[in-house]
Amino acid sequence: MPTPRVEVRRSQRRRRTVTAYREGETIVVLMPDNLSVTEERAWVSKMVARVERKERRAATPRRWDDEDLMRRARELSDEYLGGLAVPESVRWVGNQRARWGSCTPKDRTIRLSERLQRMPEWVIDYVIVHELAHLIEPHHDERFWGWVAHYPAAEKAKGYLAGWSDAARIDRPPSEQVVPGEDVD
């Protein structure tokens, strides 16, 4: 792997924190102005490694198989839905372009978009809980959203997925769209 181009930006306003991010082909490292050259070198090395590690993790899809997904779904059902949602199967699918997941309550099957495999685990958990809630309440009504709300990171995950969809210019699924004039928390 070639050595990335690094740009160090020092700031008198920055007191203690050092952060880094990728800007195109460059890794930008932000640090306090009062660090020595030796400290700068150490921080740059550490922060470049951190950015590259994060990028590798993001590029590597989850290695969960259907059995792992089923086990996770059972754990989430027990923890947040009182064990009431018992799926027959949970699996990854590659044909969902407008949805993050889907559930067929009649045969109790849950399908998750492969796009989720590169997302944080708490986001995947939210989608699983959302689909599990359909096994209890099939429609996106107040009772359904009440079940989903048992997952503590539900609103955060919905925001994450909405932001991801907007950035990728993908229409949000109907259940996640904001209706004009509707109150948004």
Image (tube, rainbow, N blue to C red):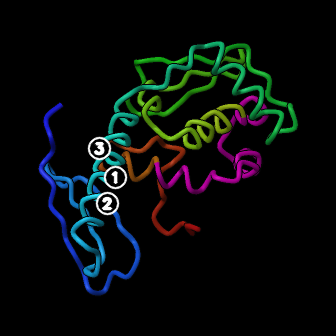
**Image height check: is 54 above or below 36?**
above
- Mark 1 and mark 3 lie on one chain; the one further toward the N terminus is 1
Rendered location of residue 41, percent (x, y) = 24, 59
- Left or right of 8 on screen, residue 147: right
Q: Amino acid type of disc 3? A: Ala
Q: Amino acid type of disc 2? A: Trp
Q: Secondary structure at mark 3?
A: loop
| Res. 18 image quadrant | bottom left
Q: Amino acid type of disc 1? A: Lys
Residue indicated by mark 2: 43
Q: Residue furthest bottom?
A: 13
Residue indicated by mark 1: 46
- Left or right of 171 on screen, residue 125: right
Distance in Å between CA atoms under marks 3 and 2: 33 Å
Rendered location of residue 80, percent (x, y) = 79, 42
The magenta segment is 133-160
- Mark 3 and mark 2 lie on one chain; the one further toward the N terminus is 2
- Residue count near mark 1 (Cα–Cα under 10 Å), binned few <14, some 14–19, many ≥20: few
Residue at x-position 53% and y-position 25%: 112
Rendered location of residue 161, percent (x, y) = 46, 47
Residue at x-position 66% and y-position 13%: 67
Q: Residue furthest front?
A: 38
Rendered location of residue 87, percent (x, y) = 74, 20
Q: Secondary structure at mark 1?
A: helix
